[in-house]
Every structure is written in structure tokens, then in C-alpha cells.
Amino acid sequence: MAALALRGLVKRFDTKIAVAGVDLDVPAGSFYGLLGPNGAGKTTTLSMAVGLLRPDAGAAFVLGHNVWADPVEAKRRIGVLPDGVRMFDRLSGAELLAYTGLLRGMDTAAVDARARDLLDVLGLADSGRTLVVDYSAGMKKKIGLACALLHAPRLLVLDEPFESVDPVSAALIRDILHRYVHGGGTVIFSSHVMEVVEKLCTHVAILADGAIKTVGTLDQVRGGRDLEEVFVEMVGGRTATGQELSWL
Amino acid sequence: MALAVEAATATTTGAGRDPRAWDFVRLKLRLLRNGFRGQAWRVVAFVFGLLFGLWAAGLAVLGFSVSADASPDVGFVVAAFAGTAVVLGWTLVPLLFFGVDETLDPARFALLPVPRMILARGMLAAAFVGVPAAATMLGTSGLVLAAGRRFGEAELGAAAVGAAFVGVVTGLTLGVVASRAVTSAFAALLRSRRVRDLAAVIIAVLASSIGPLQWAITAAVQQGSLDQAMRIAEVLSWTPLAAPYVLPYDVAEGQWAVAGLRLAITLGTIAALMWWWSGTIESAMIGVATGGAAKPVKGAGTGAVAALIPRALRGVVRPTAFGAILARESRFWWRDARRRASLVSILMASAVLPIALNLASSGAASRGRTSELGFSFAVTMAGTMGGMLLANQFAFDGNAYTAHLLAGVPGRVELRARAAAIALVAVPVQVVVVVAVTLLAGTPEQLPTGFGMLAASFGSAIAAAAVLSVLAPYALPENANPFAINSGGGSAKGMLALVALIGTLVISMPVLVAAFLLGSSAAGAWLVLAIGLAYGTAAALLGTYIAGDVLERRGPEVLVAVTPRR
């Protein structure tokens, strides 16, 4: 059974079609990269997949549970790191973790133990008493990841987890995600950084203009070429001729 | 939007021309129009606001025209009191209810080479664009009509009409500038943690200054004594509050020096407020006002959960989703500048209203049933405003609400925890107010009735606010000014809050009636307390029950609605 299955997801904003019928199967145990240029519909697709944004058509299934028909069961199984989301940032890191844990109905002892572990591993224990609002961008990503991991979900959905993260933290996050997949978890994350995707992923899908352009294992998609080359070709980017911006 | 000004500048003259005030007005009109695009309900709400404004303005014009037939003294008193109401209204109402329209956010102009005074002038010109300013202008133009009818035949008639026009325009300008200056100053004040205790002092000062004024006016009206009203109007006419509006009376009598002096008072006040305001514009632009860095949390307990739940709540609150939300909400009412601004304004109002009303009725020497009713009404208003703090409760969280949605928090738990938190924060203050009012008035026997009314109205307001917050949430702008609201949509839904306010008063009417019927005897007063507590609890439970159901279905829609658009 697929860890995450999307069936014909469509989302329209006013007159603009943001996502035009996305089908995707994320196999259990895979490390899945969702690639796409800015405005391709990555965030919209993932939001619909986890129950944050109601699709105009289509359905999403998490380990067989329909996200929109049976949200409670589906949400119990996923951990999400949304992009650009303001957290309850006037709490300290430990408080935020405790808050997330209690919202999910976990018991005090488990929340305390796991929060301590996560803060230690992510190197946030020293700033245990600083409010999240004063965290750096990289620290905010890390505490967001900790919130997503706290209830030990079977599927992780991460929107741009490596954006504005320094190399040291990025390496740490990569290690943690690797260990998580090794332990039987499934990760899908969006990105437009080719190097990260090539280094991490077992599977790749390229999304552009709200539709999947190509999908498969990393090697299938690459077909022996450079991933960036494939990506630019699929997305249909343009190259500068040298005629424009002559006044510069 | 800043680019649009630049574009407007660039397309007309290429480069190098400073934007004129008209450019800002055009920019605001454009933004308003774009705000309506594809939002049918916004258009509807706007039209209702417009109709309401027209209706109020029409009534005002009618009233002023009628006053033209009375004696000149009456006309003078009417002009002075109406003018005071207009200017005070413009100054205080944004603080309490609607906030100011920050469609044009000064911060957006930070990168443009626009001189400060030109920017201030442009922002001011744009501030006139809107229903409230138009309605005020239309309504107060009744004073020009009145001047025409009263002095039309007189020797200096034309001059008096002209003076009335000048007065109406400068009066409106004064009101608009004052609303801007006061909200930015108050915003800066509330943003700083150190002075937030000062807010308590301001509450007390405002309460004690509005009280006597209220008393004087009410006493004058109740005794029907024109002399006394005239004396008050005389005093007011030398303050910026009424000075612009009594100009025609001076001019008609040929007292040019007096008229000149009053005009000078008005213009001087406008200039001073402009200067003050333009200073705050600058600090808003360079981001001085984004609030000081939050301080680290002080020594927490050992575990993460123990750190989350404040010491005062430990033992009472169990570590569940309800407890977590309750703990976070009750802290955020103080930690978040925007919430703090709403909370302090509302608590201020709910302290001022009962005290002022009580002083007014006790000064009027007409003790008895009417003053009792006034007291009940004031306490009802206080409780209502306390509960209505939650009318747009999800917007305070913005898209942080995502966390609740992802965790699948049950709707009823969510709404009840939030209601419990605001009760924890607001009710103690209101209880103190009720006690203070009854003690001041020397009527401690009203205490049970007061508490009953408070409980009933607070519970009803929680119910109304829960439903409203789920059905009609709207995003607050990510702005340094905690009083800022979005134009169009925001103010339109602010109107909805007003409707819910009236709805709450209607819901709690049965208890108000019970208080009137039973409140006079000691046993009856205790009965009112019991009824009020039961009624308020039942209303709050029922309201959150219904709204919680809706929230579970509409959660994603609420999230989209409260996410600020970038």
C-alpha cells in the first residue's frame, strides 16, 4: 500500500488553476522528492494532501485513510512541516513541543521524554528558554521538524525543509531523515535544490504549472543525465540571448 | 503598492517629480477596488456600510436643520455638543472597536525616496477616502445648512455660512488626524512591555476624566437647564473639540477676533497632531516599532509540559489538549502585542462605561429604577465586550492555527478552551469593576445582580463570538500597528461584529428583564445571580457546541481566511 496516494487533485484560485489534476503514489519506505520551480503548485499540492487546503476535486489517502473523509485517522499518521508558517512563536522551544504533544493527546511522560530527546539531537537544548520568535531561520526549521516528528508518525510531509538552513543544520536534518526512512518511515518533501534531491531521494516527481511532468525512481527520471538538465528541460526554462537588458 | 506610486510617478513625468496627495488617493481607491474583485460578500458588506453611513448622516442633517429653528443659544449648544461628539468619536472609537484603516501601510513606502511631510500629507489625504469620513462630512454639512437657514437673511449671512463650511471641513480634518495620531501613539505604548502596566494607569485616568464630563452633560440634559448646557458649551467651544463647529455663530455676530482665535486653536491642533503623527510614520517606516525582542522565558520547571502550563494553573489544568490551549491562550493575551492592544482597550471600555453611567445616574438625583437599569445595562455592555474579544479569535493566531488543524483538535475543545482562557484573563478585572462601581455608588445590595448580569452577558457574548469567529473570520494584516485592520473586507466584517454585539444584547435581554423585575429585593438579587450564572453558562456551552461542529467542517476554510495575504 502506498504511504501517500493522491488522486486527481485540483485547486483553483479565482481564475487561476494552481493544481490541475495531480496523481501521485508515494511507496512506503521511500524518500520522495517533489521538485518544481516557484509557483509550480508544490505547496498547494502538499497542503491538500495533508488536510490544510480543501481540494476542488480529487482525493488524498494516507496509508489507506482518506484525508478529507476520515481526517482524524489520517492526521494521526502524518507529521507535517508546512512552509512559511508562523508557529505559536511566543513559546519557548520546549513549550512549543509540549503544546504540540498535548494537542495530539499524548501523555505527559512521553511528551517530556521525547521533547528532551528532540531538543538534544537538534542542538536546541541550549536555547531551551529562548522564545521561538527569536530563533534564527534554521532553528525555526528544526523546531518545526521536531514538532512534526514528536508523535512518531509513519509519514513525513515536509515543505521546503532545507530552505534558509545553514549547511551544518542541513546535514543534521538529512541524517535524521535518513535514519527515519531506515526505520521504516516514509518522507516526501518539496524542493527546488537539485543537489539535495540527488543526494537524498529514492524517488522523484517533477511538478510544473500544476501538473506532474515526470515521475519515477531517481535513476529513471535522470536517465543517465544530470538532474538539473532534465529539470530545466521538463519545466521549459529559457536562456538569455544577450539581447535583453542591454541598458544594464 | 509602493511600486504603484512609483509607477504613477514614473509614467506621468518620467522621473523626479514628488508624488502628490492625489496619487495616494488614487492608490487607495485602486487598492479598495482590487479588494472587491471576486469577493461578492465584500461588496455586499460595503454597500451595507455605505447605507448605514448614509442613514446616520441623513439623521444628522435632519437634526441640524431642525435645530436651526430654535433659539441661537440652542443652536450653539447643539453645534458645540455635536462637534465634540464627532471629534471625540473619531479619536476614541478606533481605539475601542474598529481600529484604523491601514490600507496604505507606511512601511511599504520605506524604500521610496518620498519626503516625510509629503508622505504624511498623502497618507492623510488617503485617510479621507472611506465611508466613515464621507458620512461624517455629509452629516456635519447639516451645520452648514442650519447656518444658511438661521443666518441666511442676516447682514453677515454669507460669511457665516462660509465659516460653517470652513468649520465642518477643519473639524473633520481634526478628527481624522487625531484618529491616526492617537492610534499610532497608543500602539507604540502598548508594544513596549515595560509600559504596559502604565496602561492600567491610563485606564484609571480616562475613566475618571470621562466620568465627570458625562455627569455634567447628563445632569444638564435631565434638568433641562439650558443655562448649564450653555456654560458647558462655552467651555467646549474654546477647546479643539468644538471650536471649529461654533465658528458661524461668532462670524454672524461680527466677532471676528473670537472666530479667528477659534480657527487658530483648531488649525494649531491639526498642525501639532500632524507633526506628531508624521514622526510616528517615520518610525513605523524604518521598523523601530516592530516591538522589542522578546525576553527569554524565565526559569521553567523540569519537563516541557510543566514549562508550558503556568504555575498558577498547575493543579487546576490537566495536561490535555484543552489544558494546553487554555494555558497558551491565557499567556498570549499578554505576550502578543495585538492581543494586548485589544484586551486593554476593551477592559478600559468595560471599566469606563459602568463607572461613567453610574456617576451620571447618581449625579442626576433621580435615584431608583432608572439608575438601576442603567447599572444593569452598563454591566451587560462590559460583559458583552469582554466576550466579543473572541469575535475574530483565529485571526490572532494567523496561520499558526495550522498546528491545531494538523493535530485534528476537536472543534468544541478548541472553542471552549479559548473561551475559558479569556474568562480567566478578563473576568477578574470586570468583577473588580462591578465591585468598585457598587461601592462607589454606595449600593452594595446591587452586587449579586451585577454579577448575574455579568455572567449572563459574558456567556452570551462567548456564544455569539464563537459562531461569528467560525463563520466570518478575516485576516489581520502583518503590521507593526496592533490597531491596524485591512480595508474593505476587514472593516466590513468589523460591522458584523457590531451586529453580533447587538445580537448578544438581545440574547441576554431575558436576564436584564429579570434583573429589573427581581433586583429590588435582596432575595430577588440573589435569584438574578443564580439565573445569570446558569443562563451565561448554558449560552456559552450551546454556542461553542454549535460553532464547534461547524469548525470541524470548516477548519481549512478558517485557516485560509485568517492567513494574511502576502
Image (cartoon, rainbow, N blue to C red):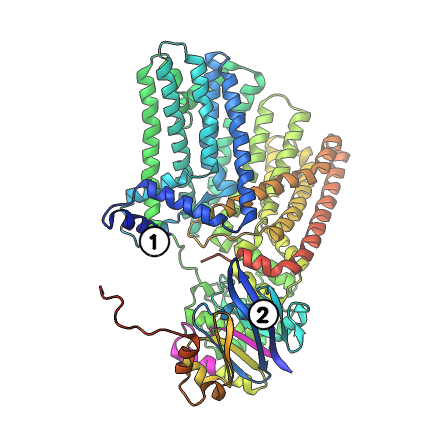
For marks 1 and 2, give the one nearer the viewer. 2
Q: Quadrant of residue B346?
A: top right
Q: Left or right of A216: which side holds B316?
A: right
Tell me which corner region of the image, top left, top right, bottom left or bottom right, holds residue A237: bottom left
Relative image position of residue B420 (x, y in whole percent): 64, 53
Mark 1 is on which residue type?
Answer: Leu
Q: Residue at x 35, y 37 (%)?
A: B273
Q: Is residue B385 above or below residue A87?
A: above
Give neighbour class at mark 2: few <14, some 14-19, many 20+ (Cα, 10 Å).
many
Determine if the magenta segment contains residue A48: no
**Whether residue B72 is visible:** yes
Q: Residue at x 37, y 12 (%)?
A: B253
Q: Residue at x 37, y 43 (%)?
A: B26
Q: Which residue is mark 2?
A: A9
At label 1, counting other C-alpha atoms closer than 10 Å, the crowd grade (few under 14, some 14-19, many 20 or more) is few
> Where does the image place residue A229, in percent across and percent down from the top left?
39, 82
Query: Helix, strand, or loop for circle 1?
Result: helix
| Residue B331 is at least partly visible in this image | no
Q: Position of residue B64 (x, y in %)?
A: 50, 21
Query: Which residues make up the magenta segment?
Result: A152-174
| Dot 2 amino acid type | Leu
Q: Position of residue B277 (x, y in %)?
A: 35, 41
Give the camera-side residue of B27 and B355.
Answer: B27
Pointer 1: what residue? B3
Q: Is residue B205 left or right of residue B310?
A: left
Helix, strand, or loop for circle 2? strand
Q: Is residue A161 left or right of residue A59?
A: left
- Chain designation of label 2: A
